Image (spheres, rainbow, N blue to C red):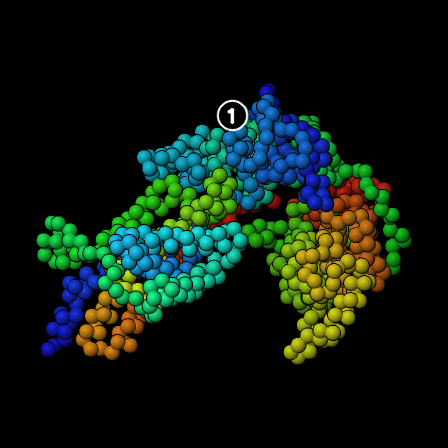
Amino acid sequence: MDAFDILGRIITLTLFAATLRMATPVLFATLGGICSAHSGVFNVGLEGLLDLGAFFAVVGSVALGSPWAGLALAIVSCLVASLVFAVIHLELKAHEIIVGLALNLFAYGLTNYLLVAILKATGFYKSPLIIGFQPVNIPLIERIPIVGELLSGHSPLVYLGFLGVALAYVGLFKTPWGFHLRAVGENADAAEAVGINTRLMKYAGMLLSGALCGFGGAFLSLAYLNMFSENMTAGRGWLALAAVNFGEGRPLKSLVACLIFGFADALAIRLQQFGLPSQLVLMLPYVATLVVLILSAIQRSRKAEQVLESPPPAAKPVEV
Amino acid sequence: MPEAVAMLHITKTFPGVVANKDVNLVVQRGEIRAIVGENGAGKTTLMRILYGLERADSGTIRVKGQEVKIPNARVAIALGIGMVHQHFKLVPSYTLAQNIVLGVEPRRGPFVDHERALREVHELSARYGLTVNGEKKVSDASVGEQQRAEILKALYRGADILILDEPTSVLTDMETDELFIMLRRLAADGKTILFISHKLREVLEVSDNTTVMRGGRVVGTVKTAETSDRKLAEMMIGRETVEIPPREEPPQVGQPVLELEGVDVYDSRGIPAVREASLVIRSGEVVGIAGVEGNGQVELAEAITGLQPIACGRIRLEGREIQNRSTRQIRQAGVAHIPSDRNSTGVALEAQVWENLIAVDYHAPPYSGMLVLAINRILSYAKDVVTRFGVQTPGLKSPTRNLSGGNVQRLVVARELGSNRARVVVAAQPTRGIDIAGTEAIRRMLLEYTGRGAGVLLISADLDEVLALSDRVMVMYRGRLADAGRVDETIRQRVGRLMTGAEP
């Protein structure tokens, strides 16, 4: 078996299809992070929100027998959590980073507790009662070779995630609402001075960020796996923060970072099947994070250099 | 001409201060009205009331003949009032056009119509001769262009009454001239302009009428064409004074302690703020620097005390050159500094009283050993100076924030004079915003200090204070120092002339 042969067996269409799947939860959290970042709140609670979303999606699905009910409960629970976050930050003036970290710890504790209290399980909960999302085959496209295999047959949430990128772009950069939201995030004083309700916009940014994490969490427990387990978010909320940072607020650019993470995740799973030590292979997503962060740092320092190199504005002569 | 704005019997008090006392201001349509006064005269408060940022305790406001209540800026905007703040309120990454339309942007369906916004902004800009490149980002625009965008922002919202708060403080002279041309054009178009300033030259140049405020009251309103900078300066400073006993026989005046020779200082924008300043202060002498604020006084004080570099010239302390040394070196050589803004430069408000008291001397014996502070020695020293300088404090370990303004100032004076080491005291606005008892005490402390052979450089916008304390007076005008000579019967006239740039 030569090298090409091995490579050929690793890098397959399935791998790329898996990339799209693995990118989805990070993508939802990233879109959420972008919304709150544009309103001027750096949301480090994405990880906790994903965790809550994943847990309550399972609860909703088991209780009501439908993955859509699970999704709805996930969204509601994340909305409530971000509302609490928003009130503590905006009304009680607590620092956003501290509140975000608290949210992460709280979500971890709460889901583990409720796992025992509601689902009577420790560590993880897996049951045929969990009704997950079924893959969707897109008519026409599924029949196109290659493209069909790549794009068809995913969970509906995958498509919603990519639709979300487009919606976020249009919402943030084309509508008056986004125009106001970004102004609030960048200079709240200026926005206030022209009569924009800055507080309301910040609430909107944070609640959106919660709702989107609800989608991401539900994807993890009802589409990617049909189960909930302790720490199943595996740092995806933090990866999302890196993607937000990399994208500098632009959804399309952040999508690139999400795809890199998704690819690393998919590759890690694939390589495990080839008998590589899992400890090494499972590092891949985090190595990818480092790479993304380094790339964004390089790109930023390039920009800074350009600014420095451009000539300073000419000083006007002063009448003496 | 119909009336545009009438503010009648406006009174506004803040805790401990009356900012506006029964103020009347009536402005006609199409008029450029200057409102002048020293800092703290109440002019900005009055304008903030008109723009809905403050609410008057009593009084009525009429806009275009209608009696109105203006609870917030939104109402003011709806009434056609626009305000250009001293510090611009713009979103840096947005273009100028986007900033101008923000909040009332034109739409096409559910989207912002950026093309139409740009077109409308350029139409408006052309109509009033307020040149802006709407496609330029704020961060790439000059200060003048940003200001024009702020004015356009108000006009775009339909403002026909424009309030400009110290609009020239951020502009170069050339930009100022351009601004004035635009303001005249706006007035000719029927817009009413309220222009806050303390620069008399500009007021005379651009306004139709001038309202002078002092101590929260309107001193008078005059036709600008019929007044002069001297008359305005007199109105601003006032003649009636709290009687301060004149200095008794000047103490022994000895050797020069501080000498400045041809000192130039540039401000943060690279514009000369102090030009060729020369002065001599002898031991035992108080030299006062009078002048309208913003003529380079702050930069002069900061240059002497090492907080700003000097571009050229020499500063000598008892014969030794100290220019451009570090602040600590200059302080150790014997310069004390009572800065004009006590809350930002004078003390750390969050620090405890004793920490602020030792902030100059903490680093060396006897207050500091190799590794740790000699806390007991520091506390007993702090206790001593707090008593000597009459600082009223809940305790040495309470946060400085809990002290009243007057006591914070006493604390600063106690720190600067308490160690008895200073040979020169640079005191900038040492009694600003302080009650009468505190003012008296601080003035007495400064005078006593000269009795120990130190020299005092007193910088104050309060001419009465300068005249009461100084042996000699100099006047600062547009960065230059002019000598008004010894304090005698005619000093007030001489100072008044020099304050407006006239030859002595």
Q: Is residue B439 in view?
A: yes
Q: Secondary structure at mark 1?
A: loop
Amino acid on which disc 1 is placed: Asp
Disc 1 marks which residue?
Answer: B189
Residue A314 spot, x, y in % from top left: 48, 49
Up-down: is A8 above or below B155?
below
**Residue at (34, 58) in percent of width and height:** A56
Horizontal arrangement in the rendering, residue A63 relative to residue B421 (left or right): left
Horizontal arrangement in the rendering, residue A76 relative to residue B162 (left or right): left
Residue B367 spot, x, y in % from top left: 72, 74
**Residue at (72, 30) in percent of width and height:** B220
Which of the pair B81/B67 is nearer the observer? B67
**Residue at (48, 46) in percent of width and height:** A199
Q: Is residue B302 in view?
A: no
Up-down: is B153 above or below B384?
above
Which of the pair A201/B270 is nearer the observer? A201
Residue B371 spot, x, y in % from top left: 64, 78
Corner quadrant of residue B227:
top right
Which of the pair A181/B257 is nearer the observer? A181
Q: Residues within 10 Å of mark 1 (few under 14, many from 20)?
A: some
Query: Label 1 is found on which chain of the structure?
Result: B
Residue B145 spot, x, y in % from top left: 48, 41
